[in-house]
Amino acid sequence: MSVTENHQGRLIRIFKNLLPSPFTIAILLTIVTLLLAQFVAKPKSEPHFDFFIKMVTSWENGLWDSSAGGLYFAFQMMMILVLGHILALTPAVDRLIQALLNYCNTTASSVITVSLGAITLGLINWGLGLIFGAIMARKVAEKFAKEHKPLNYGLVGAAGYATMMVWHGGLSGSATTKSMEEGYIPEMMKNAHISGNFPNNVPFELTIGSSLNIIIALSCLILIPALLYLIAKKSKNEQIPKFDAEFAHVLKSEDEKPEGAERLDYSRILGMGLGASFLLLGIYKAVNYEGDGSLGFIQLNFINFMFLGLSLLLHRSISNFLKSLDIAINDVSGILIQFPFYFGILAIMQSSGLIVLFSDSITSIANSKTLPFFTFISAGLVNMFIPSGGGQWSVQGPIVIETASRLDASLPKTILAMAYGDQWTNMLQPFWALPLLGITKLKPQQLLPYSFLVMLLGFLIFGIGLLVFS
C-alpha cells in the first residue's frame, strides 16, 4: 500500500471544499435544523411565521440549558480535556515519553510505539491520550531531525491521532459515562419531552466494562498499530523533519525564587499533599459506594475528581499545575462556544418533534438486532457535523434511547454503537486534530490521508463487532 503526495493532495482538496471550520458547521447545522423544522415538522394548522418564532425562541432557550444535560455537561467535558492535557504535561509522562523514544528508530517502529501509547492512554482519558500522542509524535520527529534520519512524519502524527478512534469506549466517553449517572436518563428524556419507561441508568459493566467493548478496544489496540506498521513499510514519503525550536513541555519551577505567601504556590508539601488527599477521598467514596451496580461510582465527576488529584500530585506544586492549566485551557475554546449551539439545535428538535420523526425513520428500517449497526452509521454521519462527542450525545442521545425502547433493542449496545460511530469518523473530521496539529506543526494534508485509512479499518472493527456479538 503506497500513499503518494498526489493522493494526499487530492484528498485534502476534497476535505477543504466540503468542510468549513467547526464553528461554521455548528452555525450551518442550526440553520438546516430550523429549515427542517419549518418545512418537515411544522403542523399544517400553524402559521409559518408563528412556528418560526417559536423555533427561534426554543433555540435561544436551549443555548443556556442549565439542566444536567446542558451547560453543566459542557463544563464536565471541558474539565476532561483540560485535566487530560495537564496530566500529559507532567514530568512523569515526560519520563514515559523519553523511555518510549528508545524504541523509535524507524518510521515503522515509531508508528507502533506512538499508536500503542496514545490508544492506551486514550482509553483512560481522551484528553490525556490526544495530547500524549501529539507530544510523542513531536518528540519522535525531533529525535529523527537530530540524527538526520528521514521519517514519514505525517504517518507518525496519524498514529498519535488514532487515539480519537477509541476514546469513547474508555473511561471518559461522553455517552457511556453520562448514562451511568443515576437518574440521568429519565431526566434527559423528560427534557426532550419524550415519555416512556426508561431505566434509571446504564451501569459501567453493561457498556464500558462489557465483553463487546473490551473485545473491540483490544481489536483496535492490536489492528490499528498493525495497519500503520504495514503502511510505514510500504510508504516512501519520508523526509528529515525540520523545526525552529524543540517543544518544551516539562514545567519546572526550581530556578524561581518566590517570596512571601507566593511560596505556598511552590510548596511540594502543599501541592502533593492536596493531590494525594483528593485521590484518597475518591478511593474512599468508591469503596463505600452504595448505588446500583458494583462499578456505578465511575462517572464523569468521579473521573474528573481523580484526575484533578493525580494532576496535582504529579506536578508536585500548585505553581506547575497552574502553568500547565494556562497551556491546556486553550484546548477548550471550541467546546466553550460550540456546545451552546448544539443545545440550541437539540431544543429545536425537541419542540418541533423532529426527534420523534428521526426516531420513526430509524425504526422503520431497523429491528432489535440491526438497530446498533444503523445507529453506528448514523452517528458517524452526525459526527461530521457535530464533532464533539458530548454535543452529539445531547442531540442524538434521546433519539437513540427512544428508538431502542420502541424496538426492544439492547440499550447498552445501542449506546455503545452511537459512541463508536462518533469516534469512528473523527479520523476524517479534523476538529479534534487541532491540538495535535498545533503541537506537531503538521499540516492537515500530511495527516488526513493516513487517518482516513485508519477510519476504513475502524468501519470493519466496529461494524463486525456490532453485527456479530450479541
Image (spheres, grey):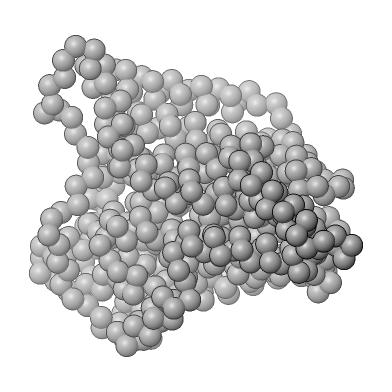
The residue sitting at 39% across, 25% down in the picture is 275
Observer-nearest residue: 135 or 78?
78
Answer whether residue 36 is visible to the viewer in this image: yes
Most extreme residue toward the right, as rendered? 45
Quadrant in the rendering for residue 84: top left
16 over 77 or under it: above or below:
below
| Side of 111 where 165 appears, left or right | right
299 over 450 or under it: above or below:
above
Observer-nearest residue: 300 or 323?
323
The residue sitting at 25% across, 80% down in the picture is 237
Please state the horizontal and vertical placement of residue 356, each as a whole percent of the image.
Answer: 81, 60
Please state the horizontal and vertical placement of residue 250, each as a whole percent of the image.
Answer: 22, 41
Answer whether residue 397 is visible to the viewer in this image: no
| Side of 137 where 424 appears, left or right | right
The residue sitting at 74% across, 36% down in the picture is 183
Specify the quadrant that holds the C terminus. Answer: bottom right
Please state the horizontal and vertical placement of residue 439, each as a whole percent of the image.
Answer: 28, 56
Specify the quadrant that holds the N terminus. Answer: bottom left
The residue sitting at 39% across, 81% down in the picture is 13
Quadrant in the rendering for residue 289: top right
| Side of 251 where 327 appears, left or right | right
Q: How many numbered marks appear? A: 0
Please state the horizontal and vertical placement of residue 47, each as a whole percent of the image.
Answer: 82, 61
